[in-house]
Image (tube, rainbow, N blue to C red):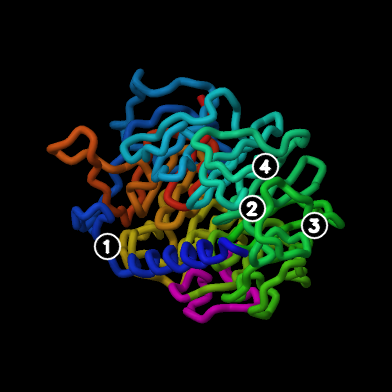
Amino acid sequence: MQNAWKDEWMDGWMDGWMDGCADQRHSSFGDNKDTSADTMTAKTVLLSYAPTTSRTPTAAPSSLTPTTSHPTSAVQTYACGRNGYGQLGTGTTTSSYGSPVPVMSAYTVTAIATSVYHSLFVTTSGQCFATGTNYYGQLGDGGTSDSMTPVQVMNGYAVAAVAAGNYHSLFVTTSGGCFATGLNGYGQLGDGRIEWSYLSPTPCMSAYTVAAVASGSEYSLFVTTSGECFAAGRNDYGQLGDSTQGDRNTPVQVMVNYTVAAVDTQTHHSLFITTSGQCFAAGRNDYGQLGDGTTTDRYTPVQVMTEYTVAAVAAGHYHSLFVTTNGECYATGYNANGQLGDGTFEHKNLPVAVMSAYTIAQADAGQFHSVFITTQGHIYGTGDESSLALCPLYSWSLTSYNCGYLSTPKQLLYTGSKATAGGDSTFFICKS
């Protein structure tokens, strides 16, 4: 436990910094840019994507014209945003504020998980790679050295799904095995012990066949192939959803009266979807991120979005996104950076409709930004521009970016099949 002070200091510093930003609308780069009047200004679309629904979305602006300067790879992964820990996997710690950069170019990536400090990639062949900070062994490569270039981990296994917490990682194999690595001070690895950290993936949930996982700051959620849901780790806000505030080092079953299809979490609150499309939320709720009309923390999952059948959810730092089965999108919670995308900077404690002119196929939430993909593959972003590669250069500089906040979603550079937002960065998987 000799390094416990570092974790406590980092947690306190991060929480203090996030809370300190709560009422600030100006740019984090000191330009005091007020973007309350932002409008949807489209950038050039590159790649095509086959629609998956017969509903016709609103046409893209006619000014969108492909240019030969854009990449033309059939399937390519791009990254943008902050990169101080090497979490983008570009081989440097240089941030990408002006345009996305290609990563994992030698591989076809199917799944990505990212946190504030590190990122995980899964390829079509089931290989798994990790990049970023590694102080607690969260990369799972057996050491504690940070990596700016993705390193292969989980050798010998075909990986199907991954999840990245602040300082830990979860891996699900194609056979339903589950492994965890990194910090375990709250029992978040779910192996029944509280060890300081593991440097290599260790088995967890061994009695079950795992289908999906999600990682919060210091806790984890597991969904089995039979729809059971388990939670382990830190529980100070009730984020585990077990009706208590007690930490758990052995996974405890939650949502026991329901068959769970999907879960998501990022910091201190959890979202659950049942196989019938009901949606539940638990945990921290000071900004209305649970969407139940209150700002009261919930230790037992409370049903939200009761009038809708929910197909997908995304949990941000203090906000949440919901996508219905008919492609509508709703957002709730913290909104000082415009991450809800409703044209305001006001917090909401009930979900509000966003991206109403489009049929949404997927949405994801970072700390202070959100991304949306339409059924035609058009990608939109809102919130912190520095996480979305939407920062314009200052008029007097070729290297300094003028980053602010967007309250209305703006169309991004590429079209694609998947977008992953987490921490202060965003990844896109694009198709030709």
Q: Look at the image and tell me whether residue 389 can be seen.
A: yes
Q: Quadrant of residue 414?
A: top left
Q: Farthest residue in the top direction?
A: 68
Q: Is residue 253 magenta?
A: no
Percent position of residue 33, x then y: 20, 55
Assign a secondary structure to mark 2: strand
Question: Which residue bears the numbered disc 1?
Answer: 25
Rounded to the nearest whole Å, what is the CA distance between mark 4 and mark 3? 21 Å
- The earlier-in-sequence mark between 3 and 2 is 2
- The earlier-in-sequence mark between 3 and 1 is 1
Rounded to the nearest whole Å, what is the CA distance between mark 3 and mark 2? 16 Å
Assign a secondary structure to mark 4: loop
- Which of the numbered marks, if any, corresponds to residue 305? none
Q: Do the residues under discs 4 and 2 have CB atoms within 8 angstroms? A: no
Q: Look at the image and tell me whether residue 360 can be seen.
A: no
Question: Which residue bears the numbered disc 4?
Answer: 142
Q: Which of the two discs, 1 and 4, sits closer to the camera?
A: 4
Assign a secondary structure to mark 1: loop
The residue at the point 19 percent across, 57 percent down is 32
Question: Which residue bears the numbered disc 3?
Answer: 205
Query: Which span is picked out in magenta?
Result: 286-308
Q: Is residue 304 magenta?
A: yes
Rounded to the nearest whole Å, what is the CA distance between mark 1 and mark 4? 42 Å
The residue at the point 53 percent across, 63 percent down is 7
